[in-house]
Image: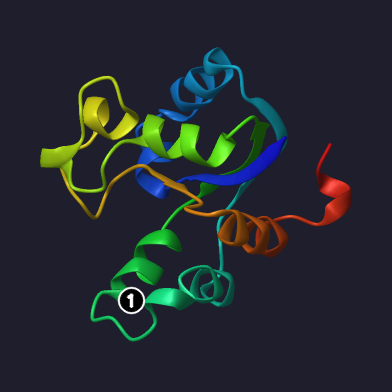
Amino acid sequence: MERTFVMVKPDGVERRLVGEIIRRFENRGLRLVGLKLLQPGRALAEKHYAVHREKPFFQELVDFITGGPVVAMVWEGNQAILLVRNMMGALKPENAQPGTIRGDYTTDIQTNLVHGSDAPETAQSEIALWFKPEELL
């Protein structure tokens, strides 16, 4: 079993797509083992996006993610990271296929609804950043 971190970003919460996103992962057979609604502070957002710190869009990412509530989740299943990434769809809206979350619901690279870990190491560090061990089933 593999675990991955998923976040519904402020635009997804504002557009009331949280339930739809959860439904898609559950229907795929993934198991929800952690869930919380919160408005991240700057310190948490900067740690989450630390890999992008030197990029010109870093502050814009931090501002966006702290601009409203997010839903942080941990999903578990066989190849959970790859499944979630495929279900999210491509980052660029013009490359996101219909049937994916981004392909069905987004038209802008900045407001792309969801974040999902891209590798086992990333998943482990993101889960630890957003969740205490006792918050996971």
Residue furthest top as drawn? 27
Image position of 92 (left or right of 136): left
Q: Position of residue 119 (x, y in %)?
A: 52, 54
Q: Quadrant of the C terminus?
A: top right
Is 104 above or below relative to 45?
above
Q: Quadrant of the N terminus?
A: top right
Residue 36 visible somewhere in the drawing: no
Depth check: give the residue in front, 28 or 74: 28
Q: Position of residue 64 (x, y in %)?
A: 35, 62
Q: Residues within 10 Å of mark 1 (few under 14, many from 20)?
A: some
Q: Residue at x 29, y 71 (%)?
A: 60
Q: Quadrant of residue 13?
A: top left
Depth check: give the residue in front, 124 or 9: 124
Which residue corresponds to mark 1?
58
Residue furthest right as drawn? 134
Image position of 90 (left or right of 121): left
Residue 80 visible somewhere in the drawing: yes
Q: How is the image coloured?
A: rainbow
Q: Residue at x 61, y 61 (%)?
A: 121
Q: Position of residue 112 (x, y in %)?
A: 29, 45
Name the amino acid type tagged 1: Phe
Residue furthest bottom as drawn? 54
Q: Residue at x 25, y 29 (%)?
A: 105
Q: Residue at x 55, y 56 (%)?
A: 39
Q: Element type at marker 1?
A: helix
Is 104 above or below relative to 42?
above
Q: Position of residue 8 (x, y in %)?
A: 47, 42
- What is the number of callouts on the image? 1
Is 86 above or below relative to 136?
above
Residue furthest left as drawn? 94
Image position of 133 (left or right of 85): right
